[in-house]
Image (spheres, rainbow, N blue to C red):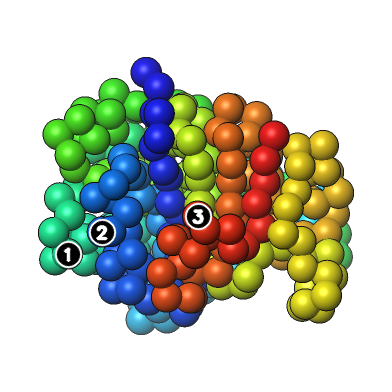
């Protein structure tokens, strides 16, 4: 089933996102085209960890990709944070006249597989981590999402997947890419807390406005920190047939509308 003019927007989970402003922008867009909203949970997760005395830790792969370390005690906090953010976005959209449906409790549309052995750089040495509850996405329940869109409901998706090992932390950007690809979306917008991709961050003269498919390897080399995951997600979405991916600044007012008008870094085939 094709997504036609379907737009998938991933709202960043870091500090600085104005949820009310983002949802006001999305409400206008939802009146004109089919929309799916995905979101991150970083800031909410950090706050809950601080309240509950759970350590916030990251894992860095030998290739430089950074991800949240989610041992069992952190997984429970992660699930709570994901549901809180999901509820907040659904409520904000509803307040603006958009019928939104959260997929964080009764039905989680992503199916994943837990990474049972992760190679990570710990204190300068490569170690194997076996108690992490993050996962790779294996399946997307597109039928439920299309059914929501059919009755003019906007699906709101957390970065969370079901698995044989319970609920898993999945990367929000790559989850958005997987959903966009599976649903045949036309465009994926990934909002961040920076303007987009830089060859040498934060030098404004090195800002990259366009990346063609053949330049993806170079773009991954330019990206630093969490931006690597976003560039990787952009490549995965394009490979699955999404026409365009935009990484843009989610701190700006009307961030999605501005991204669709040409701001940010555009990835195309």
Q: Position of residue 175 (x, y in %)?
A: 49, 43
Q: Position of residue 68 (x, y in %)?
A: 57, 60
The nearer-to-camera label among 3 and 1 is: 3
Mark 1, residues whose alpha carbon is within 10 Å: few (<14), some, or many (≥20)?
some
Q: Nearer the viewer, residue 210 or 149?
A: 210
Real-space Cα separation, disc 2 to disc 3, in angstroms: 15 Å
* Mark identifier at residue 96: 1
Q: Residue at x 69, y 34 (%)?
A: 269
Real-space Cα separation, disc 3 to disc 1, in angstroms: 21 Å
* Mark identifier at residue 260: 3
Determine contact: label 3, label 1, CB under 8 Å. Answer: no
Residue that carries the numbered disc 2 in the rendered image: 27
Q: Quadrant of the N terminus?
A: top left
Q: Residue at x 49, y 76 (%)?
A: 251
Is residue 266 visible to the viewer in this orientation of the structure?
A: yes
Q: Secondary structure at mark 1?
A: loop
Q: Is residue 45 left or right of residue 127?
A: left
Mark 2, residues whose alpha carbon is within 10 Å: few (<14), some, or many (≥20)?
many
């Amino acid at each position: 089933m094709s997504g036609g003019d379907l737009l998938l927007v991933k709202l960043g989970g870091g500090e600085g996102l104005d949820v009310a402003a983002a949802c006001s922008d999305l409400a206008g867009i939802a009146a004109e085209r089919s929309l799916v909203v995905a979101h991150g949970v970083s800031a909410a997760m950090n706050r809950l960890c601080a309240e509950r005395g759970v350590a916030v830790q990251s894992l860095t792969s030998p290739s430089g990709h950074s991800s949240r370390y989610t041992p069992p005690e952190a997984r429970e906090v992660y699930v709570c944070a994901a549901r809180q953010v999901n509820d907040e976005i659904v409520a904000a959209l509803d307040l603006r006249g958009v019928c939104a449906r959260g997929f964080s409790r009764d039905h989680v549309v992503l199916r994943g597989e837990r990474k049972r052995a992760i190679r990570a750089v710990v204190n300068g040495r490569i170690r194997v981590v076996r108690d992490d509850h993050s996962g790779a996405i294996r399946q997307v329940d597109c039928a439920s999402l299309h059914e929501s869109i059919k009755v003019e409901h906007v699906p709101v998706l957390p970065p969370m997947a079901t698995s044989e090992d319970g609920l898993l932390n999945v990367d929000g950007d790559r989850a958005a890419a997987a959903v966009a690809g599976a649903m045949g979306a036309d465009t994926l917008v990934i909002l961040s807390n920076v303007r987009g991709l830089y060859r040498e961050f934060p030098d404004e003269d090195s800002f990259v406005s366009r990346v063609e498919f053949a330049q993806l390897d170079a773009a991954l080399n330019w990206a630093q920190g969490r931006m690597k995951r976003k560039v990787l997600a952009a490549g995965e979405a394009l490979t699955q047939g999404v026409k365009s991916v935009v990484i843009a600044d989610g701190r700006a007012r009307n961030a999605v509308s501005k991204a669709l008008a040409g701001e940010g870094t555009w990835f195309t085939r």
